Amino acid sequence: MDDGQLGMEPRRNQRTIAASGALEGIGYWSGRDIRVEFHPAAAQSGIVFVRRDLPGAPRVPATIANRVEAQRRTVLRRGEAAVEMVEHILAALAGLAIDNCEVSVDQPEMPGCDGSALPFVTVLQRAGIVEQDCPRPAFAPQRPLRLGDEDAWIEMRPAESGKTVIRYDLDYGGGNPIGRQSLEVLLSPRLFPWNLAPSRTFMLEREAAAIQDRGLGLRTTFQDLLVFDADGPIGNHLRFPDECVRHKILDLVGDLALAGCDLAGRFAAYRSGHRLNGELVRAIVAQQQAESSGNWKRCA
């Protein structure tokens, strides 16, 4: 585990950004130019995506109820409005403990940037973060939750510390430079910007070729994410020796944000992806509702 980290407090006030910020980039899948804007939001608003390119600027709250299944990414849909590849933005917001924010976008897909959450973190930090006069809901499970099978699984267990600890075991097998990687971290708004946020999306060269054969990702280059051949990243360099497992934890942080509350517990995952991550969040929300643990606090 990383040493000296300060985890999420089990009781804290909600937070939003102090000012608006924006960035532009291309969509990995669509290849379209995209501008995303971040705006402050009132307490209890949560994270809400706004499709300003559509009539009436429909709003899509970032909740597990709006999650729909999609390949290799997290997609939210409410009515006819959808937002795609939202996991890195959600990870940036959750990693910095920003609970209320309006994310306005002019395309269905979020910009890929460099394949990490760092560009979003940079914009949010420049905007500033302010505390709001309302407690943040938190949930600590009373019993373990585990989903999956021997090939891929994920679980959440109670933790005495009241903090969020995440362990991921990545296993790409032999014969490739990704191989097997393991890491355990204590989720920390103070350290998230450097220990998880810079880690980038990755895939094998044959996986990238298969995506482009479908006519997708045609503007995405080897500098926009990590594509591995037998010798390592093509035309790129690792930011961490274990960058791939760090990115899997980053994705999990983004998917867990769909619970809409701080989660105090120990998470462990083996070869889990967005589908299993989402199923765990649904189970967590269901358990919270069943247990009525009293950990939720509302504004007066």
Image (cartoon, helix red, strand yellow):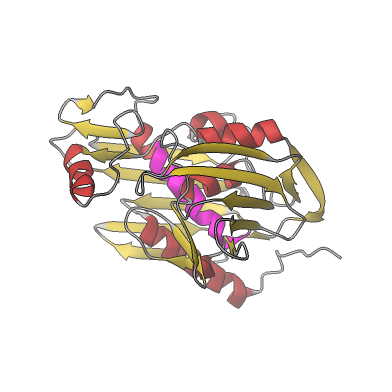
Is residue 248 placed above or below 146 in the rendered structure? Answer: above
For the residue pair 286 and 239, the one nearer the viewer reads as 239
Q: In this rendering, does residue 33 appear at all?
A: yes
The residue segment tinted magenta is 246-260
Q: Going by the image, does 85 lie left or right of 186?
A: left
Residue 262 location in percent, x, y? 63, 54
The percent coordinates of residue 86 (x first, y second) are: 48, 51
Q: Is residue 69 above or below residue 24?
A: below
Write down the quadrant of residue 265 in the picture: bottom right
Left or right of residue 236: residue 142: right
Comparing 87 with 246, the one in front is 87
Please state the horizontal and vertical placement of residue 281, each as a whole percent of the image. Answer: 49, 63
Note whether residue 145 is visible.
no
Name which quarter of the figure residue 208 lies in: top left
Q: Main secondary structure of the magenta part?
A: helix
Residue 284 vs 160, above or below: the answer is below
Q: Residue at x 59, y 77 (%)?
A: 290
Q: Residue furthest right?
A: 300
- From the top left corner, tell me how far across and down residue 8 is, in percent: 65, 45
Q: Is residue 291 left or right of residue 235?
A: right
What residue is rendered at 62% in x and 58% in y?
A: 48
